Image: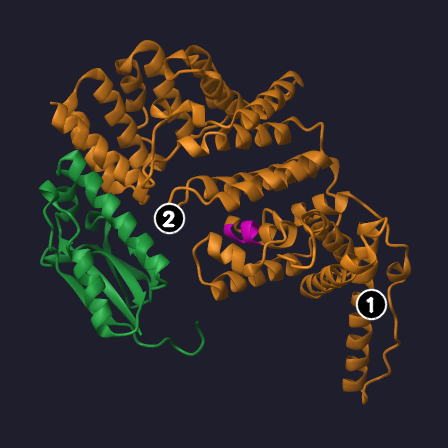
Chain colours: A green, B orange
Amino acid sequence: MKFMLMMNGPRDAYEQFGSWPKKDIEAHIAFMVTFSRKLTAAGELVSAEGLDAPTQAKRVRAGKDGKPITDGVFPESKEYLAGYWIVDVASPERAYQIAAEASAAPGPGGVPFNMAIEVRQVMSGPPETK
Amino acid sequence: MTFASLDRRAEQLLRDLAPQVFGATLRRFRDFAACEDAVQEALIAAAAQWPRDGIPDNPRGWLIQVALRRMTDHVRSEISRRNREATAIEEVPIAVAPALYAEPGIDPDDTLVLLFMCCHPSLSSASAIALTLRAVGGLTTAEIAKSFLVPEATMAQRISRAKQSVESSRVPFGMPDAHERAQRLSSVLHVLYLIFNEGYTSSSGPSLHRTDLSNEAIRLTRAVRMLLPDDAQVAGLLALMLLTDARRAARTGPVGELIPLDEQNRTLWDREAIAEGVALVSTALSSGTVGEYQLQAAIAALHDEAPRAEDTDWPQILALYGMLQRMSDNPMVALNHAIAAAMVYGPRAGLTLLEALDQDERLAGSHRLVAVRAHLLERAGDRKAAIALYREAAGRTASVPERNYLLMRAAQLNEAS
């Protein structure tokens, strides 16, 4: 079964991350790279993507004529999706375990960051795609 | 494409011949998809028969014969199917083009014509890239999809739409005339350059290199050079690819982080590729006409030939960027020109040149202008401004390795101040 593990962060998470000491940024990146390699080696990783900073984000909806109406990000949004992993695992417990491991990624001073990871099951795909 | 039954040499031979066979088949029948199937069948037949009977004396002729026979069968069965369907309509004479029975002439230019077709200016660059890798490079749809990190079904659609546009465009399968040829060749070279760059600096995804694509671009450019050995632009592009790719091993650290040119371990550079690239660019430059690829290759050669970063011949690089700037109105060239000016005349000179680029709409919102300004401010000793701009650039880039590099640069500067 597939699960999406979502890393959410406040709007200024990117700036916060950028203001960490160099060795802490390095340790965090090294952790994420190793984590992704481990999931790949275990045959559990389906995909993983990091998203660009929310300052670049736009909200789009269709206007009356179907043309896009774009808007900057609404300020009331407190949390943004920063990145996600999709894993294919045997049980929900295994997905929680992976999420806990990601949550323990090192933060400032090398202390586990303990960010909240949202775990959602991925429904099986529509019939025309694989 | 892999053939388990074949040794490496025979497999390489098949890969090299596939686009020529495809070109020769397509020259006679305009049906892109059916020709592709026929070539595929010819390759499978070779994989079955060659290990048993040995490689024929004329492997290309052999493959073309088999592919044409398959196409003839295909056309016959199509005609009889249509005849069966058209019983009430007047009888359709079974006519097969006389060209079918012509000796399968061997025309090495078929690969080139095929490239001209796949890189036709009417196609979007994404389509041209996919079609070139499929039809000329002989990569499977799955391999191409994997290289571009998209689902196979998506890539299959992209390729099939590209084929349809080629078919419906009625571009004649033949060598364009001399006047059109230079222009069409530049489209081909541009597509090959895009394939190389896609492999060298992935536009998306966590890792910086997708070496399979860079290697494929180099292989295809080598093939074009075999066909047009006297073309200085082709030689220049091949040199540029080799001289850039030579630094691959030194360009990233253990966790995929970007290492800038002046901090790279130059002993990791591929000396053989550099020697080949330098020889190529020297010949290309001495041939008279100077184009963009030769100039860019000459700049890459100057970097590659410097034993240490501080030995780099910046005055000559500055002069070459000046020539490039007069040749094309490309803001990225202007950015590099400013960097070279900073290396020769000091960071303030570079910063002054950057001011002129602030108004360029093509660079608006681009992280590169911001990152270059940050670098020059750092060199000028304005740490605070440099840190702020490194972070701003990090927030704007869509490349993970680049973002990490910029953040670390800011952090390092922050700790030093």
Task: Give the numbered dot on residue B395.
Answer: none
* Label 2: chain letter: B
Figure quadrant of the N terminus of chain B: bottom right
Residue at mark 2 to residue at mark 1: CA–CA distance: 44 Å
Residue B172 appears in the picture as rendered? no
Q: Earlier in the sequence, mark 2 or mark 1?
A: 1
Judged from the image, the secondary structure of the residue bearing numbered disc 2 is: loop
* Numbered circles on residues, count: 2
* Label 1: chain letter: B
Q: Name the residue type under label 1.
A: Thr
Say which of B293 and B2 sits in front. B2
Left or right, residue B22 beside residue A122: right
Q: Which residues are magenta?
A: B126-130
Say which of B93 and B307 sits in front. B307
- Quadrant position of residue B225: top right
> What secondary structure is the magenta-colored segment mainly?
helix
Whether B416 is drawn above or below B180: the answer is: above
Q: Name the residue type under label 2.
A: Ser
- Residue drawn at 77 percent across, 75 percent down: B78
Q: Position of residue B287 (x, y in %)?
A: 67, 19
| Mark 1 burial class by Cα count in 10 Å: few <14, some 14-19, many 20+ | some
Residue A58 appears in the picture as rendered? yes
Residue underneath mark 1? B72
Q: Position of residue B33 (x, y in %)?
A: 67, 64
Whether B217 is drawn above or below B32: the answer is: above
Residue underneath mark 2? B204
- Residue drawn at 66 percent across, 49 percent down: B117
